[in-house]
Image (tube, rainbow, N blue to C red):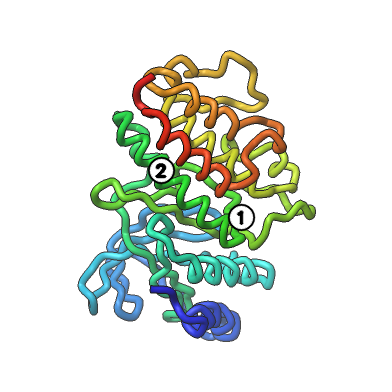
Amino acid sequence: MSRSSNDVDQMAAALRLYANHSDSHAQKNLRAGTRLDKYRLLKRLGSGGFATVYSAMDELEHRRVALKIPSDTFTGNVASQADLTREIRIMARLEHPNILRLKDARVIDGKLVMVFPLGEETLADRLTKRISRPQAIDFTTQMIEAVAYAHEHHVLHRDIKPENFILFAHNHLCLTDFGIARFGDSLHSQSGSGTLGYVAPEQAMGKATYRSDVFSLGLVLYRMFSGSLPEYPFTPPLPGYTKLRKGLTAPFVELIRKCIDPQPTRRFRDGVALHNAFKQIRTTTNLRVR
């Protein structure tokens, strides 16, 4: 069921509250056992330059959740607050089984807290283990559907990589971390963004479009099926290409190669076009057998 516009506005309003009152609250030293309203921190899952993610127990609902808490230094300027407002609004509006749901966003003890369902591991973790071809095809389906839905709703993710796909029970996969996402397919100059190894060449130059997300997703697929991540500029033979082709149909291999074409105009125009092509391949060929 979709959230109401009031729910979305209430989540986004958390940042205004943070900006107005964060200086007046003593900042807690967050560690295991710390209470933030109804949440009790269990452990730190990871951190980056912008935020730290914790596993926590929702003592009221008695279930584990993930808490994303932006760093004080990041939230201390107007531009960063605008980025966080955008992330909250984007994630609050996207309702799809393969996009991680933002359960809540609010200020607790002077800290902005974003609450998400807690997954089991990232796709990056899963890629360190053996993945069967049928399971890899299933992951492919879920990832393409997530990106297609985001693009259909005018959201450009800009940081698609294995670490930003979260796995839940029964191999259910969700796209997350819309921290640098933007509304609309824009060629206007932007600061370079994305993650080294997965960022499209034009995105690195500040010209990200939906085709840039297609490129990044294509590299995730290439790595999943080949076990290797080619380095740009791509020069044949690509590493792992023989393994990539093993057991996959020529149309599916060509779909992946089209996604990672260095020339943006030769890629699928967006996730929707990629999704349509993938569905056509699935209905006309067996992806696992030549």
- Residue 63: image quadrant is bottom left
Is residue 150 depicted above or below 126 in this figure?
A: below
Confirm or deny contact between disc 2 and disc 1 (CB under 8 A): no
Residue shown at the point (36%, 57%) measured from the top left: 44
Sequence-wise, the earlier of marks 2 and 1 is: 2
Residue shown at the point (68%, 49%) measured from the top left: 209
Residue 129 position within the rendered picture, expressed as x and y whole percent measured from the top left = 30, 31
Residue 53 position within the rendered picture, expressed as x and y whole percent measured from the top left = 41, 59
Is residue 112 depicted above or below 252 in this figure?
A: below
How many neighbours does mark 1 have within 10 angstroms: few (below 14), some (14-19), or many (20 or more)? Answer: many
Residue shown at the point (31%, 67%) measured from the top left: 41
How many neighbours does mark 2 have within 10 angstroms: few (below 14), some (14-19), or many (20 or more)? Answer: some
- Residue 132: image quadrant is top left
What is the CA distance from the residue labelled 2 to the residue labelled 1? 19 Å
Q: Which residue is mark 1?
A: 156
Q: Which residue is mark 2?
A: 141
The residue lying furthest to the left in this view is: 62
Q: Quadrant of the C terminus?
A: top left
* Of the pair 131 and 271, the residue shown nearer to us: 271
Describe residue 154's horizontal placement relative to residue 97 as left or right.
right
Is residue 25 something one can see in this rendering?
A: no
Marks 2 and 1: which is nearer the front?
Answer: 2
Residue 89 position within the rendered picture, expressed as x and y whole percent measured from the top left = 55, 71
Say which element carries label 2: helix
Q: Quadrant of the N terminus?
A: bottom left
Q: Amino acid at mark 1?
A: Leu
* Of the pair 247 and 163, the residue shown nearer to us: 247
* Of the pair 72 and 81, the residue shown nearer to us: 81
Residue shown at the point (50%, 26%) measured from the top left: 251
Residue 189 position within the rendered picture, expressed as x and y whole percent measured from the top left = 79, 53
Is residue 189 something one can see in this rendering?
A: yes
